[in-house]
Image: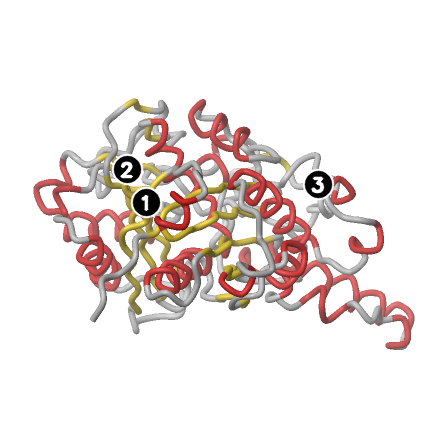
Amino acid sequence: MRDKRRVVITGLGAVSPLGLDVESLWAGLVAGKSGIDYITHFDTEHFATKIAGEVKGFDPLNYVSKREVRQMDRFIQLAVAAADEAMKDSGLTVTDELAPRVASIFGVGVGGLESMEITYEKMMELGTPKRITPYFIPMMISNLAPGHISMRHNLKGPSYTVTSACASATHAAGDAFRMIQDGTVDVAVTGGAEAAITSLGIGGFNAIKALSTRNDEPQKASRPFEKDRDGFIMGEGAGVVVMEELEHAKARGAKIYAEMTGYGASADANHITQPAPGGEGAIRCMNLCIKDAGIQPSDVDYVNAHGTSTPINDPLETEAMIGVFGEHANTIAVSSTKSMTGHLLGAAGAIEAIALAKAIEKQIAPPTINMETPDERCTLDYIPNTAREMKIVNAMSNSLGFGGTNATIMFAKYEG
């Protein structure tokens, strides 16, 4: 059996509630800035939750033509914008020879919910399906995010979407990692996109009482691991990471942010929305990732936690991390950047992978903001309120989704 090939990160792109590029995202995270505010996408008069992490100031015409806008749901537009930045950042030229060796693999949890709502309302209003746009299905289905990106950048390797709720983008990154490791491709453009801040999206999560209703304090509503948290805040956006086989990246003189060294995936087999007791599934997932990376739990310096700000997730994820790290859990640095971006559902893992790469590059761990009184069951060092300069060699990110699906990835400081 041949040795696994090494995989490095050479390009980053983001459109998030903190801004329209990676620079804005990272600056906001380090500054402890919240991207949460009142919802403008629709009238929230009759909704229990009136706040979310919207992408502000995004004009799709800065990225695509008017004709293309009519063919793309918002989640696709956001994905294309982030991919454009990541590809430019990577400096990669996709020649016809290279094209079949470049994959486009995305995580999308919900897909074109906005297009579905608008199309259905129009059909009901007119009483006929004749006004349904022929672009409706391509706008709605989730694989058109990597589909458009592959066409735009001439990527002819495997192209598909992973849909696994809040773990979607992290599973997509894991698939991309494995493909490069085993030699199926040399490069992968991977990430996630989501745009579900719609009446059905907010209303649906309100129906299961998952969202915060702290409407009088939008910037303080997302408060992972904090005693007074009352639910997650939905966010929208897209994150894209260019992964590359190490020798391929070195041969072209690419900048290397970090090396991806590990991936783990598991299922709780427990409940449609609640994690397994004791975080058992998350424990197995993290252990698989650490083993895959070829390190010990004590070698992990920083964890970007799933940290949703929900009453159930935060203490169970804490319990799971204690189960994995043992005594090291008392010294490891942990934070939830969802305190600033909100929860981007299927795209969350992509934005958080970018946070990992930047944390390793800059040797700064972003904070968990709105930490005032920690939940007595949440006993770890969550980097409260202020970013921390620290040595980060190995950094891990957790994504835990409805249906009991779990994914964990490990990045490391690149050493030649």
Q: Which residue is mark 2?
A: 413
Give the mark nearest the N terminus, 1 or 3. Answer: 3
Going by the numbered disc 3, the residue's amino acid type is Thr
Disc 2 versus disc 3: nearer the observer: 2
Numbered mark located on residue 409 in the image:
none
Q: Position of residue 18 (x, y in %)?
A: 55, 33
The residue carrying mark 1 is: 259
Give percent across and percent down for residue 171. Answer: 40, 61
**Could you classify mark 1 by the number of other residues whose Cα lies within 10 Å: few (under 14), some (14-19), or many (20 or more)?**
many
**Vertical arrangement, residue 388 with respect to residue 17, above or below:** above
Residue 51 in sight from this viewpoint: no
Tag 3 residue: 40
- What is the spatial separation of the Cα atoms under label 2 and label 3, in whole angstroms? 40 Å
| Res 172 visible | yes
Circle 3 SS class? loop
Q: Are marks 2 and 1 in contact (CB under 8 Å)?
A: yes
Report the Cα–Cα distance between label 2 and label 1.
6 Å
Q: What is the image's colouring?
A: secondary structure
Element type at marker 2? loop
Check the picture and name the quadrant holding the N terminus: bottom left
**Image point (47%, 34%), residue name:** 340
Horizontal and vertical percent for residue 186? 43, 58
